[in-house]
Image: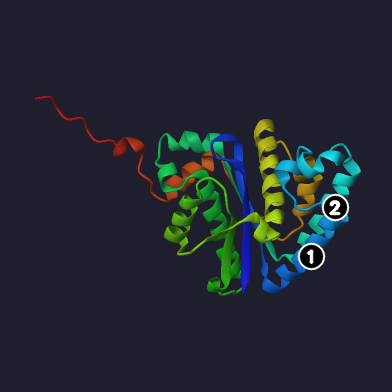
């Protein structure tokens, strides 16, 4: 039995991007993961990793906000646990400006909002990975961290597109969500920076060291398990799925008597 744990970073109504990310492993691997992860947190006197606090140095990370060495070593230890105890990583990022532009012309938000689109894309990537490794897709469970906006849309789209009953859990119920939060956060930041700099202007070694380290976690021979929907990709998505143009959805005006 394999389980994938996924979390989101970003908000669909603000910011540049929204990422959903996670990891898949066997039950035995997740048991060892939890032991190692909690030991790493304890070594740094941290109760839980929340990237919304760690990133700006808030909450329980406030006292070592400016201690770059401690922050670096802490992340390195956590990422080593991920490398050792998980089987594969998955990420899907939606560029929100592009989404809004394409949504003006196609019923994109009616079909799947940004969070749902990123989430079901991760599910699709997991299913592709499972088939490649001859893993029974019915032996894979999908767990998403509860509390993100549009969770109901993800449930609907996962059932509609993949026949999958995605489940939601509180972050406190599984430490694996903390790892998913870390990858989603780093991937979102990277794409925000790439967006600001311009496509093709940055390489992996120009990005944060923590993302470079996470890049070592398996995610496909050509990195296909990590992906981004920009405006062009979203237009292609609409075309491939034969979404009608919004103009064709408008009812013709009735003639006056």
Around disc 2, counting alpha carbons within 10 Å, would you say few (fewer than 14), some (14 to 19), or many (20 or more)? Answer: few
Residue placed under numbered mark 1 in the picture? 84
Judge left or right: residue 252 versus residue 168.
left
**Gap between marks 1 and 2 measured at Cα:** 22 Å
Residue 220 visible in image: no
Around disc 1, counting alpha carbons within 10 Å, would you say few (fewer than 14), some (14 to 19), or many (20 or more)? Answer: few
Q: Is residue 186 above or below residue 102?
A: below
Residue nearer the viewer, 185 or 146: 146
Question: In terms of image quadrants, where is residue 30?
Answer: bottom right
Quadrant location of the N terminus? bottom right
Quadrant location of the C terminus? top left
Q: Which of the colour schemes (rainbow, by chain, secondary structure, one colour) is used?
A: rainbow
Residue appearing at x 73%, y 38% in the figure: 202
Q: Percent from the top left, x then y, of residue 191?
A: 66, 40
Numbered disc in front, either 1 or 2: 2
Q: Percent from the top left, x then y, of residue 59?
A: 76, 41
Residue appearing at x 91%, y 44% in the figure: 69
Residue appearing at x 50%, y 43% in the figure: 234
Decide which of tag 1 and tag 2 comes sooner along the chain: 2
Residue appearing at x 86%, y 41% in the figure: 64
Residue placed under numbered mark 2 in the picture? 45
Residue 164 visible in image: yes
Q: Percent from the top left, x then y, of residue 203?
A: 75, 42
């Amino acid at each position: 039995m394999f389980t994938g744990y996924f979390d989101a970073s970003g908000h669909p109504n603000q910011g540049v991007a929204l990422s959903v990310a996670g990891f898949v492993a066997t039950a035995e691997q997740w048991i060892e993961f939890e032991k190692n992860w909690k030991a790493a947190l304890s070594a740094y006197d941290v109760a839980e990793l929340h990237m919304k606090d760690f990133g700006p140095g808030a909450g329980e990370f406030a006292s070592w906000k400016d201690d770059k060495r401690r922050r670096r070593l802490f992340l390195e230890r956590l990422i080593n646990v991920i490398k050792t105890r998980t089987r594969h990583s998955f990420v899907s990022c939606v560029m929100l400006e592009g989404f809004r532009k394409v949504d003006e012309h196609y019923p994109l938000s009616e079909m799947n909002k940004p969070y749902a689109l990123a989430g079901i894309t991760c599910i699709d990537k997991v299913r592709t990975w499972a088939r490649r490794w001859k893993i029974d897709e019915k032996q894979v469970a999908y767990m998403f961290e509860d509390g993100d906006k549009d969770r109901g849309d993800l449930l609907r789209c996962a059932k509609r597109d993949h026949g999958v009953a995605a489940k939601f859990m509180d972050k406190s119920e599984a430490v694996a969500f903390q790892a998913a939060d870390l990858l989603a956060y780093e991937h979102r930041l990277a794409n925000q920076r790439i967006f600001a700099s311009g496509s093709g202007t940055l390489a992996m070694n120009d990005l944060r060291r923590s993302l470079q380290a996470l890049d070592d976690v398996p995610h496909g021979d050509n990195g296909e398990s990590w992906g981004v929907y920009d405006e062009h990709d979203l237009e292609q998505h609409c075309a491939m799925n034969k979404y009608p143009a919004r103009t064709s959805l408008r009812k013709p005006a009735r003639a006056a008597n």
